[in-house]
Amino acid sequence: MRKPIFTGSGVAIVTPFKDDHVDYEKLEELIEFQIKEGTDCIIACGTTGEASTMPDEEHISVIKFTVEKVNKRVPVIAGAGSNDTRHAIKLSKEAEDVGADAVLSVTPYYNKTTQKGLYEHFKAIAESIKIPVVLYNVPSRTSLNINPDTMKALSEIENIVAVKECNLSQVGEIINLCGSDFTVYSGEDANVLPLLALGGKGVISVMANIIPKDTHDLVAKFMEGDIEGSRQIQLKTLNLIKALFIEVNPIPVKAAMNLMGMNVGKCRMPLVDMSEKNLEILRKAMQDYGLI
């Protein structure tokens, strides 16, 4: 029986920049903030961490730094996906070498592939490393879905242990097909409770960057049997989540963190600052939530 890498809330942590370089001092502050507030896992260099704008050396440096500063207090999952299988294998091996507990591997984007190609892509990655692989299924970004039958086949590979699933419509089918030792995490903050009700084990979250305790409690209350308490937190978060995705992630969450005085810097190009109109919507949602 394979155990979940984590149960609860994982933060898809932002990468703070200063003068377009990684601000490692700030990153350490963010890591400590997350652990103090109860976050159960840290996911470095994912979409929210702007991995797509990082050269490999910087990418692995951020993962290595995160692993060292976390120091085994919670698991660290390293974003290591690519639409080039050889590149994904390279990043995955390097993440393993610097001590990551698992890798998060997104479906190939732009060039895409077939379902057979998806199977072979992830199989090659899994066979290249010993640590667990978490699949990342996000059709809204990649225009490619891992179908449930393909997910079942992948789940039979020993170290493919979980999926960050953004397609809620197929979560129940995945859980039925793959069984209880394959873990499903929500990739959508607004759908955490429905996913938990179907048998998911947690969330890899954007909103946890600004509300880590509530994100943790949303899952913890459900797991403890306090369904109503979990429901109340999920409902409370919905307007804030809407504002956090009013523009392309991670533009709004970084703006939110800066409004809270966290000073994480700007996103890298081609991502740009929020429009004034949307920034005001975000500010109002944060005020209503009591964050500023």
Image (cartoon, rainbow, N blue to C red):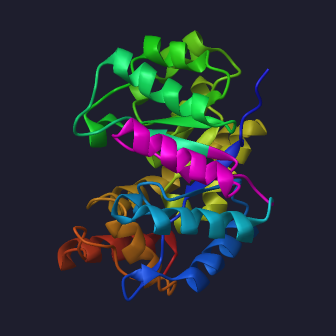
Quarter that holds the N terminus? top right
The residue nearer to you, when weighing 159 against 237, is 159
Decide: is 18 above or below 168. below
Can see residue 37?
A: no
In magenta segment, residue 89: yes
Residue 269 visible in the shown view: yes
Q: Say whether residue 98 is magenta.
A: yes
Magenta-drawn segment: 73-102
In percent of the image, x 53 and y 14: which residue is there? 152
265 w.r.t. 170: above or below: below
Residue in the foreground of this view, choosing between 56 and 204 = 56
- Above or below: residue 36 compared with residue 264: above
Q: Left of 223 or right of it: where is 255? A: left
Q: Position of residue 231 (x, y in %)?
A: 58, 43
Residue in the image at 35% along x and 56% along y: 242
Where is residue 140 shown, x and y percent of the image?
Answer: 28, 39
Quarter of the rendering containing residue 113: top left
The quadrant in which residue 36 appears is bottom right
| Nearest the eye: 87 or 107 | 87
* Residue occupying image coordinates x 53% and y 69%: 210
Q: Can you tell which quarter of the image residue 276 is in?
A: bottom left
Task: Give the percent coordinates (x, y) of residue 158.
Answer: 67, 22
